[in-house]
Image: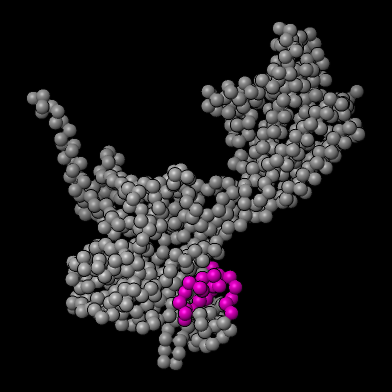
């Protein structure tokens, strides 16, 4: 009887076990996380009450101390199977812990140790023979992926360098492959492939370039050179050059010298009034102080106290483009900001994230850059090869300025819904943003600016 | 002699002029030390200037209140109003540094404290002078004037709210501090404006 009484907690354990079995939480591909990149996050539950997924990340270091970042997503009650997907930008963390909880209890929890914080991009292999690929890609961080679990959003592939399919497993969805390629991943089809891959192979027929990445069909003879090729973009370097456009300079303040001279003169004037104007000292000194206050306010106040800027970089290849938004802010007073998008914050700062939301508490005199989660869009600036030469097409609603083709030179501006043939022009790059990002783009790339958007259209792959 | 003339004469008296010179010198020195040399560094000059200005005004209020115990109420009132004139004339320092420092508190709050707190502390000074006079310890008055604000600062720590301490009250809106100081200031003004003749204070 006594032994039985000690087992009072068994039903609770069983209940927790039931919930635990019904919950799948995955961060990264196969729990392989790429630090300093966007990583896919999946939560699957069955028959659950309203729950909250909370991921707590300490982005700090031994030197900087704790810099917490919290991600929170709420899932409504579900009687059947529910699947939640998102992407989370993970810096090089000190600790990551996650918890799925309802109002009454914690349903599941876990953590990722510091040693898992690797920055090396992934090589995703869709094959039932991972070992043979490990021999071919000795310098890569290989991980096996399941076709049906591949995410269909570009941000999920931010940390994926290469995706290889050899046809030994079920074909993934075309949406997943398009997302991967647009994100900048090298997608390689290792031929011969079964007929189930026919719809995917069609993607390579019109254009091998797709967004920031490309799709490539290879066979046993061309495999090695395709794997060694480094023709995808150096996105990190490109983004760093794009970051340079962000607001970083605080307003120029008045130097201390003139301030001290005027303050001393003002003080002396007040003292002289006290001493030598015995009949009107009070009124004169107060009026002088009021005038001095108004003049000081209008002279010293740096305008505007908050400066914001939004810019977009669109990297097109074929009909699709990878859109990378950048938001920068300089604030002199402290401010609370709710940005209506998920973002990567630079410099590292305590903040909260939710699906499509970034909540920030900015201290006085601070500046930051928020790089929006990349997304897939229809290309608005296209570089199309034709029999008569290269055609530049503007599908945006704005006139494109500073149209430039790397290696061919400056072109004339391009009105909305119009096109022009690329001709040789002056090779000098227009100063500013284009000049900074052009060195990181392959020869033949077309660049243009319209308002706050920089358009980049990548050329076809060289054979 | 009209009261305004008496006030103007109080401003022109040597002791007040010397204190005013010291006061403005302190503000200019604070500006020199706290104004940043680079734009990348936050301009925190307001916090130092506002605290130094208020603390100096409060010490002057305590000093004038306690040392002028034997003066008539009219003379005490002139001293208090001279101190408030000093507070108003020095607000240009606070406004100028507020413009570049972007603190959390509104500007009216710090300017208000610069008017209400000196009146309250002037009253506290009168009480302090009277009490030390009763126990014949007026010799320790200068030390008591310095010790009292320090005591108030330490009193606030266990209380957990900025009640007496003007230095923490200047950094955040504190209704408790405002209420307490308004009560003290009202009592001070009632005392100074009441026509009682035989009072010992």
x then y, percent, for residue A123: 30, 65
Task: Left or right? Give the position of A272 relative to A424.
Answer: right
Which quarter of the figure has residue A2?
top left
Q: Quadrant of the C terminus of chain A?
A: bottom left
Which residues are the magenta region? A428-452
Outermost residue, bottom side: A388
Q: Residue at x 28, y 55 (%)?
A: A31
Residue A401 placement, left or right of B194: left
Examine the rendered structure and indicate whether residue A333 appears above or below residue A319: above
Q: Is residue A429 magenta?
A: yes
- Indicate whether A195 appears above or below B172: below
Q: Can residue A52 be seen here?
A: no
Residue B68 in view of the camera: yes
Front residue (pair B193, B147): B147
**Magenta span contains residue A95:** no
Assign the N terminus of chain A to one quadrant of the image: top left
Residue A179 % position (x, y): 34, 69
Question: Who's the residue at 80% across and 28% down the image?
Answer: B19
Residue located at (58% from left, 70% from top): A432
- Going by the picture, which residue comes out furthest to the top? B135
Q: Position of residue B116 (x, y in %)?
A: 69, 29
Does A348 sit above or below residue A440? above
Q: Residue at x 62, y 47 (%)?
A: B42
């Amino acid at each position: 009887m006594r032994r039985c009484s000690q087992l009072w907690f068994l039903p609770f354990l069983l209940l927790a076990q039931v919930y635990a079995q019904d919950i799948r939480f995955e961060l990264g591909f196969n729990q392989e996380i790429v630090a300093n990149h966007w990583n896919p996050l999946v939560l699957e539950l069955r028959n659950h009450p309203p729950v909250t997924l909370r991921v707590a990340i300490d982005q700090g270091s031994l030197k900087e101390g704790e810099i917490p970042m919290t991600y929170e997503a709420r899932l409504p009650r579900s009687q059947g199977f529910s699947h939640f997907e998102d992407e989370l930008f993970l810096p090089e963390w000190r600790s990551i812990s996650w918890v799925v909880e309802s109002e009454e209890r914690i349903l599941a929890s876990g953590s990722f140790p510091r040693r898992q914080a690797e920055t090396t991009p992934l090589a995703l292999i869709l094959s039932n023979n991972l070992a043979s690929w490990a021999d071919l890609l000795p310098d890569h961080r290989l991980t096996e992926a399941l076709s049906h679990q591949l995410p269909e959003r570009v941000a999920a592939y931010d940390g994926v360098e290469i995706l290889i399919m050899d046809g030994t497993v079920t074909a993934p969805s075309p949406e997943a492959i398009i997302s991967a390629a647009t994100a900048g991943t090298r997608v390689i089809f290792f031929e011969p492939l079964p007929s189930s891959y026919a719809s995917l192979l069609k993607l390579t027929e019109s254009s091998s370039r797709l967004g920031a990445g490309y799709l490539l069909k290879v066979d046993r003879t061309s495999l090695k050179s395709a794997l060694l090729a480094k023709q995808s973009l150096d996105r990190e370097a490109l983004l760093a050059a794009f970051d340079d456009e962000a607001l970083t300079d605080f307003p120029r303040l008045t130097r201390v010298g003139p301030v001290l001279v005027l303050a001393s003169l003002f003080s002396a004037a007040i003292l002289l009034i006290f001493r030598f104007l015995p009949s009107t000292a009070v009124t004169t000194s107060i009026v002088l102080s009021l005038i001095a206050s108004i003049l000081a306010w209008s002279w010293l106040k740096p305008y505007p106290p908050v400066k914001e800027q939004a810019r977009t970089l669109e990297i097109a290849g074929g009909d699709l483009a990878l859109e990378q938004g950048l938001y920068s802010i300089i604030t002199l007073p402290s401010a609370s900001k709710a940005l209506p998008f998920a973002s990567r914050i630079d410099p590292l700062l305590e903040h909260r994230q939710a699906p499509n939301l970034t909540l920030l508490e900015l201290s006085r005199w601070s500046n930051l850059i928020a790089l929006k989660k990349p997304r897939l869009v229809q290309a608005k600036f296209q570089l199309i090869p034709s029999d008569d030469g290269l055609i530049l097409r503007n599908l945006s609603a704005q006139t494109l300025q500073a149209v430039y083709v790397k290696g061919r030179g400056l072109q004339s501006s391009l009105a909305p819904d119009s096109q022009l043939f690329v001709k040789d022009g002056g090779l000098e790059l227009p100063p500013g943003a284009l000049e900074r990002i052009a060195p990181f783009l392959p020869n033949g790339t077309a660049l243009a600016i319209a308002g706050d958007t920089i358009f980049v259209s990548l050329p076809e792959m060289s054979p | 002699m009209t009261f305004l003339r008496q006030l103007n004469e109080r401003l022109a008296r040597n002791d007040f002029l010397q204190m005013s010179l010291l006061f403005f010198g302190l503000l200019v020195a604070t500006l020199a030390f706290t104004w940043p040399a680079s734009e990348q560094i936050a301009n925190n000059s307001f916090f130092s200037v506002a605290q130094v200005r208020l603390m100096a005004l409060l010490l002057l209020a305590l000093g004038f209140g306690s040392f002028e115990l034997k003066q008539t109420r009219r003379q005490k009132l002139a001293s208090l109003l001279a101190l408030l004139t000093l507070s108003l004339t020095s607000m240009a320092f606070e406004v100028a540094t507020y413009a570049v420092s972007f603190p959390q508190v509104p500007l009216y709050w710090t300017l208000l404290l610069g008017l209400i707190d000196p009146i309250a502390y002037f009253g506290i000074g009168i009480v302090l002078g009277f009490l030390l006079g009763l126990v014949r310890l007026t010799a320790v008055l200068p030390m008591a004037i310095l010790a009292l604000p320090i005591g108030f600062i330490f009193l606030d720590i266990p209380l957990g709210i900025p009640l007496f301490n003007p230095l923490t009250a200047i950094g955040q809106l504190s209704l408790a501090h405002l209420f307490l100081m308004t009560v003290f200031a009202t009592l001070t003004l009632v005392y100074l404006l009441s026509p009682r003749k035989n009072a010992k204070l």
